[in-house]
Image: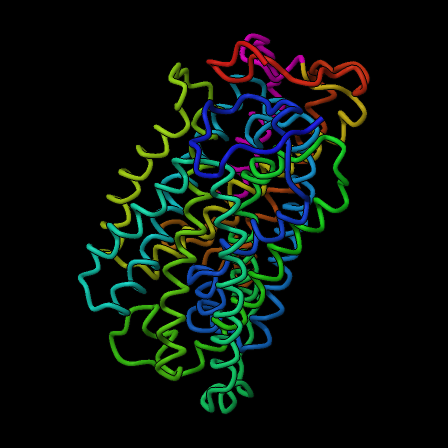
Amino acid sequence: MTTAPARPTAVEPGGIEAIPASKRHGSPWQLFATWTAPNLEFATVFVGFIGVAFFGLGFWQTILAVVIGNALGAATQGVLSTWGPREGLAQLVLSRTAFGLRGNILPAAINTVMAGLGWFAVNSVSGAFALATLTGMPVWIALVIIVVLEVALAFVGHDLVQLFERYASIVLGVVFIIATVAVFANPHFGAAVGGSGFSVAGFTLTASAAFGYAAGWNPYASDYSRYLPKDVSTAKVAWAAGLGNFVSCTVLMAAGAAAALIPAPKDATPTDAFVSGMPPWIAGITLVAIAIGAIAANALNIYSGAMSFLAAGVKIPFALRRAIIAIGFGILGFVIALLSILANYTSNYENFLLVIAYWIAPWLGIVLVDRLLRRGTAIASFIPDHAKYRNPAGIISLIVAGAVSIVLFSNQVLFTGFLVRENAPLAAVGDITPLVGFVLAAVVYLILFKVFKPKLGGPVAEEPDVIIGVDAADTAA
């Protein structure tokens, strides 16, 4: 049984407790808009740009690399989104079956930092640059405006965020299609696209960066599908979420790769460089779209960052605990974004994309294998705080796979893995850290699952309609 949702402008109370049937609503295809709108922003464009400008690939090599990276990240986005309707729980709460209540603190904490602070800062900076270029106001004032709007959406909560993403996907989709056509129509693009270089290292770095971006939404996936009715079509949920992520990422990354071939003014900001070759009216609406896109992305980042914070087991009794945490993240994220503006934004963003993939890939390997091993079984008895359920296989696999893949294969400015350093055996391979981390984590978890034999629930049909005790302040349905 479902009922009409509350007004979208009503502040969503509570935190990470399970969504009961009486509050379920929506269509699976709303997820197409949910995962389209936040990618229609400059951070997405910049992934394609760095493939050409910094990793040395030609246009078509960059396109192939981002298609591979996006396809992998979008496929897992679709799969993870199907998990939300069954229990009505957020993604990092569902992660407890693979890590146990205490072990889940690590992935929940990492996602809290990456989502609520890291991605928030990255997107706020690009939005502030766009607004400052459009209006001529100081960048820091533009940043304040962008952050206030982002936090306001996340503070109100799920339904307003979903509504905003729905309409933003339409407006931003139209604008970015026009902007992409303008980029491809630039004569400098046509003249430069024929010449290209190729390197395995550049290709894997670009594919890893694209995967890091597309899969960056994976730890949030069920956060936005948990309100859907339990009997919703899982195929529709998967396709809607996956396609929304893949199409938007691929189109804008292609535009970024094309823009990298077009000469830009000296000392231009990244957003200035992107619109420099466009007709003035297209450049103007594109800058507006970049600012709105940053808001669309960060509404999700702050909202899910707050969910991950609570999923780590933090006990906050206030009825508006999620909303209050969102404000806190907004303040901290603003400070980080302001410092990022004063630093090297381009280099920091490139490194951030790779680091995202370093932790998400092994986490993905673990939770996917865990779900496979638990197919057909209930998980209700392992999720609540009071269950004190332990599964050391998850945390050991995450640490081992993360450490081994980074120490051996990382290709960062601050650290280069032993096997990919200059004159090392795999010096030309670039960055395959996410691939190694995913496979290694999956294999190690599969082995340790057999060793530790964590508890399995009864038949999934016996799972209760509402799982009580997930949130620290959740005591009744």
Place of residue 34 in the rendered image (x, y in percent of width and height, measured from the top left): 56, 49
| Residue extent of the magenta highlight | 381-406
- In the displayed structure, 48 sits above or below 332; it is below
Report whether 254 appears left or right of 334.
Answer: right
Magenta stretch, overall SS: helix
433 vs 347: above or below: above
Number of residue marks: 0
Residue 51 appears in the picture as rendered: yes
Of the pair 429 and 168, the residue shown nearer to us: 168
Image point (39%, 14%), residue name: 317
User: Which one is in front, 143 or 379?
Assistant: 143
**Color theme of the render:** rainbow
Residue found at the very far left of the displayed protein:
138
Q: Position of residue 367 (x, y in %)?
A: 64, 32
Is 96 drawn above or below residue 115 in the view shown? above
Residue 114 visible in the displayed image: no
Q: Quadrant of residue 283?
A: bottom left
Q: Is residue 79 left or right of residue 290?
A: right
Measuring from the top left, give residue 93's x and y in whole percent.
56, 26
- Quadrant assignment for the C terminus: top right
Near-viewer residue (19 or 313): 19
Q: Up-down: is 121 above or below 310?
A: below
**Residue at the image position 31 percent from the left and 55 percent from the top:** 125
Membership of 346 in magenta stretch: no
Coordinates of residue 237 in the picture (x, y in percent): 70, 44
Is 359 left, or right, of 263 in this rendering? right
Q: Is residue 389 magenta?
A: yes
Left or right of residue 84: residue 469: left
Residue lying at 54% horizontally and 41% vertically, measured from the top left? 360
Quadrant containing the N terminus in the rendered view: top right
